[in-house]
Image (cartoon, rainbow, N blue to C red):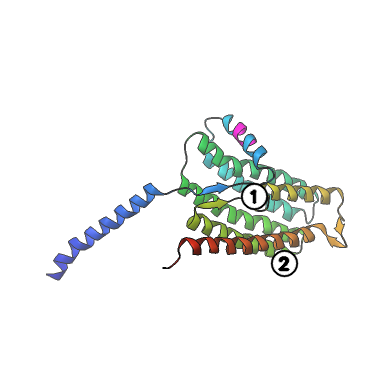
Amino acid sequence: MNHSVRLPVDSLRAGQNLQLMANKSISFKDAIRLQESLTARAERKALAWLAARMPDWVNSDHLTLLGFAAMFFAGASYALARTNRNGLILATVFLAINWFGDSLDGTLARLRNRQRPRYGFYVDHMIDTVGGLFLMGGLALSGIVDWRIALGMFIAFLMLSIEVYLAAYTLGTFRLSFVKFGPTEIRILLALGNIALWTHPATLVSHYRIFDVGGLIAIGGMSAMLVVSAICNTIKLYRSERLR
């Protein structure tokens, strides 16, 4: 008797849960993107120009996959640089291709009104995480930076990424740059370092390798951004949800 009553109730609850999930899907709001880096204005214009000229058969998924593959090959090129200096040039080329695919996919989707906010957010940032592993793994194998510094950069990147994603969920703002620096500026600095090492293999800064110095600065910078952002966002959330 109890089972015959429970089954319809359970079915009703399951249906209600599905309806709630459907409502959440419909009401999902993409976080406000905060991009205030040095190159942001010029980059937006360049991406809009490129997106308007993309062939119809190219879609945002193609560009996302291109950016992901380019990051893999950038890491592989750094690993190659251990035995062949030309790997540095290849890494620079693949960093540029990564910028093209990773930055243009969202612009193209918005231009064509083919946006998928949840799918795009999830896939893009999972790819960024795995791509970061490829890049830092390649640097660790390259011999141009101490593997412990490469590991430290990856850990700092992951921790800062977690903070950014949590802020996007809780505050509705997705910060793409800190102190005028974003992904594009990082690619540019890596490219400049690659060229410097390719032209002057023994490039040093006060007896230390240039990538070791740059890596330590990057770890310190990302750590500082993490601490400041975490404190500021905690204060915002505390003030918005005061207990009375």
Q: Quick check: 101 above or below 229?
A: above
Query: What's the residue type where badge 1 is placed?
Result: Met
* Residue 136 seen in the current view: yes
The label number, if any, that marks residue 148 in the structure image: 2
In the rendered image, which residue does mark 1 sit on? 71
Find residue 73 and report its horizontal and vertical position in percent. Answer: 67, 49
Between 51 and 56, the one nearer to me in the picture: 51
Find residue 16 and report its horizontal and vertical position in percent. Answer: 27, 56
Find residue 149 and report its horizontal and vertical position in percent. Answer: 73, 64
Instruction: Report the magenta residues as a range.
Output: 46-50
Q: Disc 2 to disc 1, how far (Cα)? A: 21 Å
| Residue that extends furthest to the front in the rendered view of this protein | 244
Query: What's the residue type where badge 2 is placed?
Result: Arg
Residue, x 14% and y 65% (percent of image)?
4
Please indicate whether residue 1 sits to the left or right of residue 87 in the image: left
Q: Is 89 colored magenta in this rendering?
A: no
